[in-house]
Image (cartoon, rainbow, N blue to C red):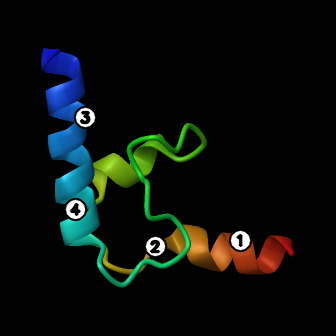
Amino acid sequence: MVMGRALALLLLCTLFVHPVHPVHPVHPVHPVHPVHLVHPVHPIHPAAELRRSES
């Protein structure tokens, strides 16, 4: 129960911090980029650039 509540809070915080990030609306559940959780100051992620160069 506490875990779910914490995850929901984390999700809300992440969505609030990254309102201009259209690619990954669900950061906390993204297993590939755990670093996102530690990036509260970056509205624009380096991951967007990486993803662009990959495709």
Residue 35 image offset from top left, x and y in percent: 42, 47
Q: Residue at coordinates 46% horizontally, 40% vertically from top-left?
A: 29
Residue identified by numbered label 2: 45
The numbered mark, 2 or 3, whose residue comes first in the sequence reads 3
Per the model, the C-alpha gap separating discs 1 and 2 is 10 Å
Please tell me whether residue 19 is drawn above or below residue 5 in the rendered image. below
Local packing at callout 2 (Cα closer than 10 Å; few below 14, some 14-19, many 20+) is: few
What residue type is disc 3 on?
Answer: Leu
Please tell me whether residue 24 is drawn above or below residue 37 in the rendered image. below
Q: Are marks 3 and 1 in contact (CB under 8 Å)?
A: no
What residue type is disc 1 on?
Answer: Arg
Per the model, the C-alpha gap separating discs 1 and 4 is 20 Å
Q: Nearer the viewer, mark 3 or mark 1?
A: 3
Please tell me whether residue 55 is drawn above or below residue 35 in the rendered image. below
Please tell me whether residue 41 is drawn above or below residue 1 in the rendered image. below
Q: Nearer the viewer, residue 50 or 32?
A: 32
The numbered mark, 3 or 4, whose residue comes first in the sequence reads 3
Q: Image quadrant of residue 40?
A: bottom left
The numbered mark, 1 or 4, whose residue comes first in the sequence reads 4
Q: Are marks 2 and 3 in contact (CB under 8 Å)?
A: no
